Amino acid sequence: MQKAFFLVIALFLSTSFTLIYAQLPAEIDTTKNWYLSWHDEFDYPNSKLDDSWDSQNGSNHHILCSRWRENAVVKDGLLYLENRKENKGGQEWTSGSIWTKKRFKYGYFECRYKYAAVEATNNSFWLMTRGADPKEGKRFEIDINEGHYPNEMNTNIHQWSDFTYDENGKKKHYSYHKAFPFGAKPGYSIQLEIPVKAQKVRLQSNNNARFNIGEFRVYGINNGNYPDVMSPSADTDIAGLKNLATAKDVKISSSGSYKNNNSEKNLIDGKWNTSWSTQEKGNKWIEFEWDNEITIGCIQFLNGWRDKHKNWHNLLSDYKVQYFYNGKWNDISVLDVSEDYNFGEEFHTYGLLWDEENIVFYFDGQEVRREKNDFCFSESPIWLSLAIIKWSGPVTDAIDGTSMKVDYVRYYQKK
């Protein structure tokens, strides 16, 4: 009996260890050369938060909310950074932002949390120096994740010591951004196993924020031989294959365009740097109609926009591609990333490996980005922040009462 008891305890401890360290990258091996140096599991009364963390208590100019200690609440083994619709500090919303009293340097940093489950929120785990320029390197900010609901991980590296000026004389600093919209991609090529005949095709989305659709292509049957959706010369890549969306008899209509600029024509101009930009509010759709019935074997489209580093932004989180038949719209392809990649419902782990040579970002223990370390050589607190922003969806009353929920923060060092 005693032997069985100890066997159960051993299995429990082994399982617990696996759960605790399951998200660590393979190179952070705690059985060999790494150890857990500092951590916070938020398993204490709310009043004890102040032992290890400082809090912002004031307003902000760059975001839409002031942030206060009372919006950071520890309960049920979690830290809640809470959004509230209340006038305080001269702003209409409040939220929470805290940072550690202790400062850290090289090592592996990890945080497990859920996003506030609403658009227009910035759910952040980050490092940033405080005070004057450090003796080593520059003032810096490493955003391990600025999470946007439902599925975006955003990473940034900022250098705050030196500034340059743009052509308009506006001050700017070094900043390098890279986003990871899980479950979404810039280009879709939808090949139909069974071709359909129709006179009308449309793409529609319930995406709340304005978005861009680049090239839209409709092809007939071609034995599965279609161009690479990301090719800038797709319309001419395959001899004899015609993009039917460019036919002379096609009529293009839409739900609207940004500032009524009639940008729908950009969908079929064959250029990467132009797009149809939707209206700000309401359901968005684009429709193609031909005089006569066509046979559809493949539909392709691009969405979002690409920056100078070739990173894609503002990718669609939902869409439907449909054809009109027998008096109704029928689905060809449907995407809703919130069903499979809803970071407001699921905990995920965001990590950073930082040393003198490299800055490496991780999602659930898997490397997603690696950069050379050029100026991040000094100590920094760990920050946890929630903010309300206007560049990631509409600001509505749905934000009130939502929260970023943090399970733990951990810091590992080499032995």
Image: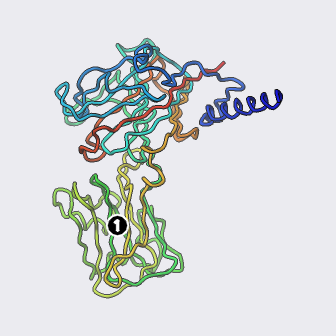
Residue at the spot 27% in from the left edge and 39% down from the top edge: 400
Residue 317 at x, y percent in the picture: 39, 55
Residue at the spot 23% in from the left edge and 58% down from the top edge: 282
User: Which residue is at the front of the view, 189 or 392?
Assistant: 392
Q: Is residue 329 left or right of residue 21?
A: left
Residue 231 at x, y percent in the picture: 45, 63
The number of discs equals 1
* Whether residue 146 is situated above or below residue 291 in the rendered picture: above
* Whether residue 299 is situated above or below residue 89 in the rendered picture: below
Q: Quadrant of residue 204?
A: bottom left
User: Which residue is at the front of the view, 111 or 239?
Assistant: 111
Give the residue type that dot 1 points to. Answer: Gly
Residue at the spot 66% in from the left edge and 34% down from the top edge: 18
User: Which residue is at the front of the view, 75 or 400?
Assistant: 75
Query: Which quadrant, please, contains the C terminus?
Result: top right
Query: Which quadrant, please, contains the N terminus?
Result: top right
Image colouring: rainbow
Q: Which residue is mark 1?
A: 270
Residue 286 at x, y percent in the picture: 28, 68
* Whether residue 59 is situated above or below residue 18 in the rendered picture: above
Q: Is residue 90 left or right of residue 102?
A: left
Q: Quadrant of residue 142?
A: top left
Which class describes the residues within 10 Å of circle 1: few (<14), some (14-19), or many (20+)?
Answer: some
Residue 406 at x, y percent in the picture: 45, 31
| Residue at the limit of the structure toward the bottom, as seen here | 292
Q: Secondary structure at mark 1?
A: loop
